[in-house]
Amino acid sequence: MKKNMLLLLYTLFYPECHAEETSWGTFDAHIELFHYHIAAQEEQESQATVAGGYLHYTSKPLYHVGFGVTHYLSHLIFESHNPALTSLTDSAGEDINPLSELYAYYQDETFSLKIGRQQIETPMLNNDTTRLIPFSYKGVTSRISWDTTSFLSLGYITEFRANNSEDYTEYTSSGLAEDGVAYLGFHTQFGSVKHQWYYYHAPKLFNTLHMEVAAKTPYDNARMFHYGIQAIYTFNNGSGENTRTGNNGGGDVKLIAAKLGIASEKFSYTGSLSYNFGEDGINRGYGGLSSLYTSSMITNGKKSGHPFAKSLKVHYTYYSPTKEKAYSSALHFTNVTYSDDSSHTINSLYIDHKFKFRPREYILLRYERQWIAEEDDKSYFRIISAYTF
């Protein structure tokens, strides 16, 4: 593992090793230092600091055909305590060193196809970049485009790798998908209104419809309204032994959310509401984080018990001489209440400060606090320093 770390650092710091684009393809590299501390009761107290990143190469296409590879590393440094609870290591508290992508591709002006290990970005199957290493998947994905705003996204995923593992298995974030997960997504835009519709088919787990319509409208010369609605509906649940309680335990999810905000060059304010009419929750979907307006880093309104979630996010950019350089702060407050008396009210708050020195070089400081009625409070602190070549 030490040899892997030295090789990564050597490659990142020698420019001739990572030319952005060459006659034989494109290469990029990312290095990151990630410190995470969770303050809680003794058995849940945890702390870890990791260094790592990724190396990514995409070959130049020959007759529209090529291949891509991405290798990640998350290596523990300094003293740690219960590091597995931070998900910066594997479940045994050891370093993670996964081959996150190894795929063949075909691409022309209107059609693209990938086969193999890959990272994908859809509402219920995605990277989840809240840790140093993202989720990744084995399968086939494709995209058919009509223009820059309208396209179909199709895929069939057979195996799943979580962000704290090197192994690809049939276990999704919500349970066992023995026959995999197929999906069909449609994106389009009419004027200023964007539509995003996804259908996921997992016959041994549960099927999902994820729908979103969002738009922006100018308020005056300097400000703009942004608003949208979301809906998540699951059905045709598989056998109970395949599901994980708290993610999807056999009942349907019937969730709707809405947001409204206003943004200017420096300030943005966004308020969101969500309510789950269904009998079950869907915290993480099939992989990564299931997309929802009221989600924060540590709290969301996607659990069971008919949660009613309210959130407010304020973002302020106080220094931005160019588009490539900006210093900003954000505050995100979320409140979740339940109609079921046995459930507990949750309040969460996070504050972050991000200093972006150039497009892909930044430092992020984030403090998070969670209060749950009749339970022990928790606080979270993370420092992330990243540089991408």
Image (cartoon, helix red, strand yellow):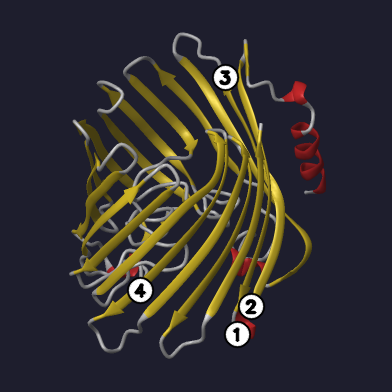
Extreme front residue here? Answer: 221
Give the label, 3 or 4, closer to the camera: 4
The crowd level at tag 3 (other Cα within 10 Å; few <14, some 14-19, many 20+) is: some
Distance of label 3 from label 1 (alpha carbons): 49 Å
Q: Which residue is mark 4?
A: 335
Image marks 1 and 2: residues in contact by CB distance under 8 Å: yes
Q: Position of residue 198 (x, y in %)?
A: 25, 44
Q: Residue 271's image quarter?
A: bottom left
Distance of label 4 from label 2 (alpha carbons): 24 Å
Q: Amino acid at mark 2?
A: Glu
Where 127 falls versus 303 (above or below)? above
Q: Position of residue 231 (x, y in %)?
A: 21, 55
Tell me the number on the disc at residue 41. 1
Image marks 2 and 3: residues in contact by CB distance under 8 Å: no
The crowd level at tag 1 (other Cα within 10 Å; few <14, some 14-19, many 20+) is: few
Q: Which residue is at the front of the view, 91 or 338?
A: 338
Q: Which residue is at the front of the view, 369 or 210?
A: 369
Q: Please indicate, yes or no, whether residue 44 appears anywhere in the rendered image.
A: yes
Q: Which residue is mark 2?
A: 45
| Element type where label 2 sits in the image | loop
Mark closer to the chain start, 3 or 1: 1
Distance of label 3 from label 4 (alpha carbons): 47 Å
Q: Which residue is mark 3?
A: 59
Mark closer to the chain start, 4 or 1: 1
